[in-house]
Amino acid sequence: MTTAAPVATATTTAPTEPTVKEQAGKLVAQIAGYVGYRTVKIGLEHGIYEAIARHTDGIAPPELAAELKIDPFYTAVWCRSAFAAETLERADIADGDRYVLAPHMESLLLDPTSPAQLGAAFVIFEQPELFDRFTETLPSGERSWWDKTGPDFISAVSGTGRGFNVRLIPGGFNLVPGLAERLDAGADVLELACGAGIGLVRLAETYPRCRIVGVDGDAYSLELASAKLAAAGLEQRVQLVQSTLEDLALDTRFDLVSINISLHEARDVERVVENVRDHLRPDGHFVVSDFPFPSTPEGLRTPPGRFMSGIQFFEAQIDDQLLPTQFYIDLLERHGFRDVGSLDLTPTHALTYGRR
Ligand SMILES: C[S@@+](CC[C@H](N)C(=O)[O-])C[C@H]1O[C@@H](n2cnc3c(N)ncnc32)[C@H](O)[C@@H]1O
């Protein structure tokens, strides 16, 4: 007697409802993130990480408190929370509660010249222009602009921009085909939306043969840029122009036009890119360095996606939003750029480039 083989039946399992415990865990994770954020911020503000970094064999909270002239009990509480947030480790020695910085925290939190730096993010998210003003104007939706923001905000943005500039110049530019040779040989470079000038100084110092122009629409940011250039002795090689990107009309033509964390802010991005084309020499490069806003729901739920969702609270107030990299690729192609490409330098920093 033969028995028929059982017929496989496809079974579809309905998605199971998450439990209260699982959902509560998601909220607890938000609270934990907030606690970690505040802990890092306190540590940066009071020089606690810097002090710990000086003690590569570890330091106990009472010694740390004595060194910094801060309360020993509070210091122990802070150390525990900084350890919980994985920014400190316990020193691997027997004599009690001594802490060292966790691996790479020194460059991530304390070194403004590091391409991996993240310390400035702990300043920008605290600024009232971000969440506080958003909360106040949520009913009215009243928009703002750069000239309505305070000096601390401009300085915090410039601090955030510093990490982007450090990665871009020269590392990012080196990855754009044909660009590094041109810059090394000496070229005319235009930085759009140069803000407080960190990128301009870096460009001028990295490429001593280049002539550089910086354009921004905000007078106060340009004053800061001018002071930075003067302090670096670069005012002869870098010219500043106050103009909106939409109304750009310069006599010079350029070999490179670059823009860092700002193209998403354009009031009329099509016109800005047309202006870029008009200001480029044939074969000239256009490099857009920006946040790559996630293009999928899954991407939004990653830590970088959530980070960038935080930036959107400010962008909304100046009437724009961060954009996915694909938007820039399409934009450059639509405007006739050739050899268009893109690459991610970090999960929150992408380059899109093309040539006229
Ligand atoms: C996020 S900040 C970036 C500044 C600088 N690129 C950096 O990396 O630090 C944006 C800058 O773009 C300028 N900006 C925004 N929209 C502009 C426009 N339509 N025309 C001219 N400047 C503009 C602002 O004034 C501000 O200085």
Image (cartoon, rainbow, N blue to C red):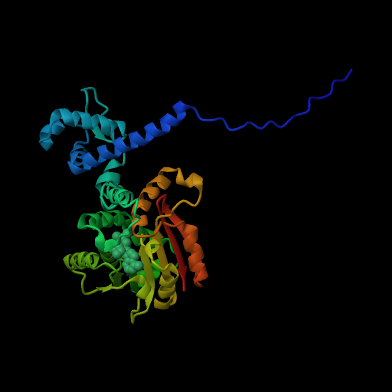
Q: Nearer the viewer, residue 121 or 190?
A: 121
* Residue 285: x %, y % from top left: 42, 70
Q: Quadrant of ligand 1?
A: bottom left
- Residue at the image point whose x is 22% and y is 57% from the top: 150
Q: Residue at x 39, y 66 (%)?
A: 267
User: In which quadrant of the rendered image does the N terminus lie?
Assistant: top right
Q: How many marks?
A: 0
Tell me: residue 189, above or below residue 105. Answer: below
283 relative to 6 in the view: left or right: left
Q: Nearer the viewer, residue 154 or 76?
A: 154
Residue 117 visible in the current orientation: no
Compared across the picture, whether 202 is left or right of 254 comes to left
Residue sitting at x 69%, y 30%: 11
The percent position of residue 97, horizontal first and vertical second, equals: 22, 25
- Which residue is farthest right? 1
Instruction: Please tell me whether residue 100 is drawn above or below residue 254 in the rendered image.
Output: above
Q: Quadrant of residue 203?
A: bottom left
Establish if 226 lies above or below 261: below
**Location of residue 103 by image quarter:** top left
Farthest residue in the top direction? Answer: 1
Residue 35 visible to an observer of this rendering: yes
Instruction: Write down the quadrant of residue 38 in the picture.
Output: top left
Tell me the residue at 37%/62% (across/down).
265
Q: Position of residue 138 (x, y in %)?
A: 34, 51
Q: Position of residue 274 (x, y in %)?
A: 44, 74
